[in-house]
Image (cartoon, coloured by chain):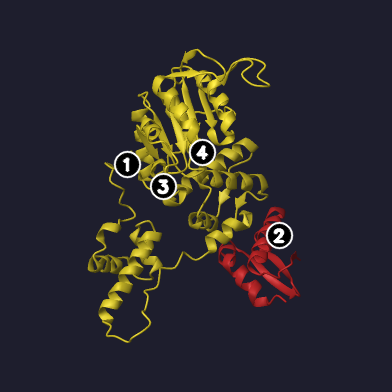
């Protein structure tokens, strides 16, 4: 079980991105219910933070919040962890031990890494969630449990169901209220506010003033891919606050991995293939349009649909890009930087989490 | 034998960002498979920056240049 870190809903940074705001609005709505919630997102995107927020915004907030990672335990151990065991159930079981379900009685149970639960255990979990009762290992009596179950997964469970690695019945039981957390690289507009928040927090903990951040560092942070997502950003900020000797964060303070990652060129667009073989007639105009269309699509993709950034990547004017997008019929994929994602976007709809 | 160009091409990837901050990483010399560099400008006096340089840049050089052995900060 994770250490019960002190949590306060005030300690959460929402960020400016429309996607995160939609998620937080959705959390407010579903915190009132008792239905299962499944939070999908890459490692470090804040699944436990959202689970905590759900608990603390619900009527169960004065009851326990128990978080447990299902990846920590072997196939045999996970059952006694979740359901507990009776004295004498197995060698070493010298006394009765309640499981996580019982410990969360009246409150919320957050089962993280649900995608790592073996198939044999999934059926037991389904029974417990469906019947709201658990049986301790080696015990015979059923214990009623009143817990709200929130699960976390780094993989797309639907895909796992299709591959036969996750039980369909459990999937539907868990997937009542889905929340999909985007990776940090898909909401780069939040990096600045998160960076400032973390610097301030770590500086306060160390008893120093929050450092000034140079524009070059901001640039590097905004370009880096952040494979470890918000957790990696948080750790980078902590390291910098602990090691900074001058009160200003400059590129020299950054881990070389971030510097090199930020300095790497954006992945180049796939070149239009030229067929080798029999020489045949080629329409130069068609070919050029194809190349233009490919390059514009690529630029829009790597700049997350931000036209100004895409225009910069292509070394053309923002207005020229607009004309060319129209000409190539690419209108649907682009949006303006200051144009927010429609507020009506259903936060429950999968927002594409790459596995 | 590691060439100066090989080392420069790796350093070149982070140099623009360091220069934007009023600093630089200068390649002083390449001897055999060892490169000597100097940190100049804003971060030159910072022990943390030296540590970053030692660990991170040396690792990047070893990753990209098979025969690279050592980075010496002078």
Number of numbered tags placed on the structure image: 4
Which is closer to the viewer, label 2 or label 4?
A: 4
Q: Residue at x 30, y 56 (%)?
A: A335
CA–CA distance in space, label 3 to label 4:
17 Å
Chain identifier of the red chain = B
CA–CA distance in space, label 1 to label 4:
23 Å
CA–CA distance in space, label 2 to label 4:
38 Å
Callout 2: helix, strand or loop?
helix
Chain under numbered label 4: A
Q: Which residue is mark 4?
A: A116
Left or right, A355 with respect to A324, comes to right
The N terminus of chain A is located in which quarter?
A: top right
Callout 4: helix, strand or loop?
helix
Q: Which residue is mark 3?
A: A353
Image-quadrant location for residue B59: bottom right
Q: Which residue is mark 2?
A: B54
Residue A262 vs residue A162, the one in the foreground:
A162
Q: Is residue B36 above or below residue A58?
A: below
Left or right, B27 with respect to A216, comes to right
Q: Is residue A348 above or below residue A248?
A: above
Image-quadrant location for residue A328: bottom left
Give residue A249's position: percent from left, percent from top: 59, 52
Callout 3: helix, strand or loop?
loop
């Amino acid at each position: 079980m994770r250490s019960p870190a002190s949590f306060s809903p005030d300690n959460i940074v929402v960020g400016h991105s429309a996607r995160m705001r939609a998620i937080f609005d959705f959390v407010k709505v579903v915190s009132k219910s008792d239905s299962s919630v499944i939070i999908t997102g890459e490692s470090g995107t804040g699944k436990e933070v959202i689970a905590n927020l759900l608990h603390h915004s619900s009527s169960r907030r004065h009851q326990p919040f128990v978080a447990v990672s299902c990846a920590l335990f072997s196939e045999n151990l996970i059952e006694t962890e979740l359901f507990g065991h009776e004295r004498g159930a197995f060698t070493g079981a010298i006394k009765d031990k309640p499981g996580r379900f019982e410990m969360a009685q009246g409150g919320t149970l957050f089962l993280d890494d649900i995608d790592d639960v073996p198939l044999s255990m999934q059926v037991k979990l389904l029974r417990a969630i469906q019947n709201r009762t658990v049986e301790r290992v080696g015990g015979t009596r059923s214990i009623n449990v009143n817990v709200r179950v929130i699960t976390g997964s780094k993989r797309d469970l639907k895909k796992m169901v299709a591959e036969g690695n996750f039980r369909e019945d459990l999937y539907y039981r868990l997937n009542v209220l889905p929340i999909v957390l985007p990776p940090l690289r898909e909401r780069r507009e939040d990096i600045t506010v998160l960076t400032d928040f973390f610097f301030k927090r770590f500086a306060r903990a160390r008893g120093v003033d929050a450092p000034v951040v140079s524009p070059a560092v901001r640039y590097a942070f905004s370009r880096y891919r952040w494979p470890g997502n918000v957790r990696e950003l948080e750790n980078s900020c902590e390291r910098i606050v602990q090691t900074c000797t001058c009160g200003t964060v400059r590129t020299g303070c950054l881990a070389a991995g971030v510097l090199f990652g930020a300095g790497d060129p954006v992945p180049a667009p796939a070149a239009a293939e030229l067929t080798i073989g029999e020489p045949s007639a080629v329409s130069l105009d068609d070919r050029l349009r194809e190349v233009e269309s490919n390059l514009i699509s690529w630029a829009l993709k790597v700049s997350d649909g931000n036209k100004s950034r895409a225009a910069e990547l292509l070394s053309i004017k923002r207005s020229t890009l607009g004309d060319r997008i129209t000409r190539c019929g690419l209108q649907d994929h682009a949006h303006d930087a200051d144009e927010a994602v429609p507020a009506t976007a259903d936060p429950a709809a999968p927002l594409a989490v790459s596995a | 034998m590691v060439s100066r160009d090989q080392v420069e091409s790796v350093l070149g990837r982070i140099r623009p960002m360091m220069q934007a901050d009023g600093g630089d990483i200068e390649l002083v010399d390449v001897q055999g498979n060892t490169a000597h560099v100097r940190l100049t400008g804003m971060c030159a006096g910072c022990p943390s920056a030296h540590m970053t340089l030692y660990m991170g840049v040396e690792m990047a050089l070893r990753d990209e240049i098979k025969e690279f052995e050592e980075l010496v900060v002078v």
